[in-house]
């Protein structure tokens, strides 16, 4: 200790003069910072001296240059063209926070717009007419309404889109409460809704609308809304000559994938910069796993594309990728597991229960109502998923009233109850143990977790028993869209909670379908 103290004294005496800074320098042109030096050999770190450090004032320009150099010095993550590497990419946060999206299926199939009264989805019309498994209702429909020489390509001239108003579409999507939109750029028929150089005379600029449908909607979405713009793209084309040739070669060749499908993906990313790339048509069991070369494209998308930092992708990129690889998982159409999933997922579903494309032969009972939509939304979000709601416009570019009505109704519900949906997280329980039709979400507020109970049915006696939440003396219960706290009492044996719902007439209800209770200070 004696030696240490002598060292401290000697060090301080030798440095006292260097610490003397003129008053004029201390105040004004120079900033000072106290430097404390400690001996690592002392248990508490013996203080040696305190000395103001002169620091020159740094301008904003110099600071920006320094920070830029520091950032550029950090090596960027480079994803390799294999699933182990690609799957390690974090999903951009905006997608999980969004929760709700709208999908639009629109193509030449909107012209016949016939599903055989529920026999097929309308967008598969060509396949069930000329493909390997023709359906009798489709064959009869063509025989009764068109000449024998009529071809599917002849429908393209009738795909006119003369009433397509992308600004109006954008307004509807904004009012729906959705946070992203996914437009079909190309379905399995191969017709591209943009002027693709890989689809000569089979695109919306060369035939039919004679306009860039993708570009027009992208512009309106970005100019009029705060939605993220995304694109659906089918890798396969049923009747493309190169695809059929590869099929005859048992997919030992990949002429179609390398000359058409993958180049189209590069094209739409560079032209339209979608923030969602929703791939489809690549998961047939008979296609060899490496046929599509999708991992090479995804490596470019994540590393070097103009949307590399914001783009999200799904899981339909080849054989055995669905529900295993990619960004978010879809696992199949209408995927709704009802239990919490380990990986981010999406429930891609459609308001027309039987078709993704528009059907003229649909009946009113074929459409989901708002009770259906709120149930699906509650089930999906509580289990960690996003809900992607599909509509199908007409050949002339209209969103028919029943689709517009459902989207507007969804938006009105989200305007009241969006707090329980957007940026929420799954709670420790997804649904209630005592009352059916109650689904939970949660959100961090300050240092506590707020729990939301989405009630699909209003109890007849206005008394609701929740079996999962545990209350405390600080617990409060409110209803979104309704002023004032609700009365409650602990459940039997201090487990769960009884909530007295207010007696409200129809005009006093905060919304018409499903109601949300906000529970503070529950566990």
Image: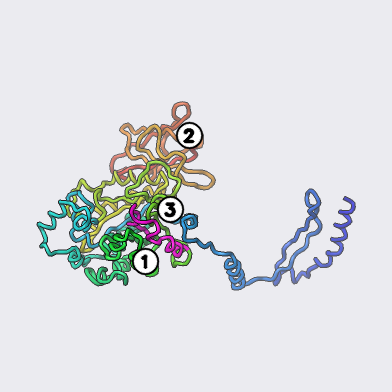
**CB within 8 Å, label 3 to label 1:** no
Measuring 84% from the left and 64% from the top, which residue is drawn there?
16
Mark 3 or mark 1, whichever is nearer to me: 1
Which labelled disc corresponds to residue 258? 1
Query: Which stretch is magenta?
Result: 277-302
Figure check: 500 above or below 316: above
Mark positioned earlier in the residue sequence (3 or 1):
1
Mark 2 or mark 3, whichever is nearer to me: 3
Q: Which residue is mark 2?
A: 470
Instruction: Report x, y in % for residue 322.
Output: 38, 51
In the picture as drawn, the residue positioned furthest to the top comes out as: 493
Residues 22 and 404: in front is 404
Residues 46 and 193: in front is 193
Instruction: Report x, y in % for residue 88.
Output: 50, 55
State the SS at label 2. loop
Which labelled disc corresponds to residue 312? none
Q: CA distance from mark 2 to mark 3?
A: 38 Å
Q: Which residue is mark 3?
A: 325
Instruction: Report x, y in % for residue 395.
Output: 21, 62
């Amino acid at each position: 200790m004696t030696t240490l103290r002598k060292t401290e004294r000697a060090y301080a005496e030798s440095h006292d003069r260097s610490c003397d800074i003129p008053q004029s320098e201390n105040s004004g042109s120079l900033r000072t910072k106290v430097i404390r030096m400690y001996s690592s050999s002392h248990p508490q770190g013996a203080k040696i001296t305190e000395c103001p450090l002169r620091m020159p004032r740094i301008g904003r320009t110099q600071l920006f240059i320094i920070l830029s150099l520091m950032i550029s010095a950090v090596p960027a993550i480079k994803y390799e063209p294999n699933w182990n590497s690609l799957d390690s990419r974090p999903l951009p946060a905006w997608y999980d926070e969004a929760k709700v999206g709208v999908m639009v299926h629109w193509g030449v199939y909107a012209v016949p717009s016939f599903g055989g009264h529920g026999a097929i989805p309308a967008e598969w019309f060509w396949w069930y007419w000329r493909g390997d498994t023709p359906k009798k209702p489709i064959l009869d429909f063509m025989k009764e309404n068109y000449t024998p020489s009529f071809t599917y390509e002849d429908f393209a001239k009738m795909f006119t889109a003369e009433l397509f108003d992308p600004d109006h579409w954008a307004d509807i999507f904004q009012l729906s409460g959705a946070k992203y939109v996914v437009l079909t750029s190309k379905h399995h028929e191969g017709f591209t809704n943009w002027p693709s150089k890989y689809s000569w005379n089979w695109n919306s600029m060369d035939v039919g609308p004679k306009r860039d449908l993708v570009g027009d909607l992208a512009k309106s979405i970005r100019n009029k809304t705060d939605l993220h713009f995304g694109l659906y793209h089918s890798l396969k084309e049923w009747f493309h000559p190169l695809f059929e040739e590869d099929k005859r070669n048992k997919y030992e060749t990949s002429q179609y994938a390398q000359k058409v499908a993958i180049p189209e993906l590069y094209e739409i990313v560079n032209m339209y910069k979608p923030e969602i790339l929703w791939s489809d048509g690549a998961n047939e069991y008979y296609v060899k796993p490496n046929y599509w070369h999708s991992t090479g494209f995804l490596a470019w998308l994540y590393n070097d594309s103009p949307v590399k930092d914001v783009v999200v992708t799904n899981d339909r990129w080849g054989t055995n990728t669905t529900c295993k690889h990619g960004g978010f998982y879809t696992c199949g159409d209408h995927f709704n597991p009802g239990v919490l999933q380990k990986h981010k997922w999406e429930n891609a579903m459609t308001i027309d229960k039987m078709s993704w494309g528009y059907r003229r032969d649909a009946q009113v009972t074929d459409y989901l109502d708002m009770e259906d939509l709120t149930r699906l939304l509650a089930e999906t979000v509580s289990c960690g998923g996003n809900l992607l709601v599909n509509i199908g416009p007409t050949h002339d570019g209209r969103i028919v009233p029943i689709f517009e009505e459902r989207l507007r109704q969804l938006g009105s519900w989200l305007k009241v109850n969006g707090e329980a949906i957007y940026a929420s997280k799954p709670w420790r329980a997804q649904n209630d143990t005592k009352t059916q039709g109650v689904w939970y979400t949660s959100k961090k507020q300050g240092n506590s977790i707020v729990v939301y109970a989405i009630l699909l049915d209003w109890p007849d006696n206005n008394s609701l028993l929740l079996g999962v939440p545990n209350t405390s003396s600080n617990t409060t219960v409110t209803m979104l869209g309704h002023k004032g706290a609700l009365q409650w009492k602990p459940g039997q044996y201090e487990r769960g909670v009884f909530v007295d719902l207010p007696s409200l007439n129809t005009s006093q209800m905060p919304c018409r379908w499903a109601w949300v209770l906000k529970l503070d200070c529950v566990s």
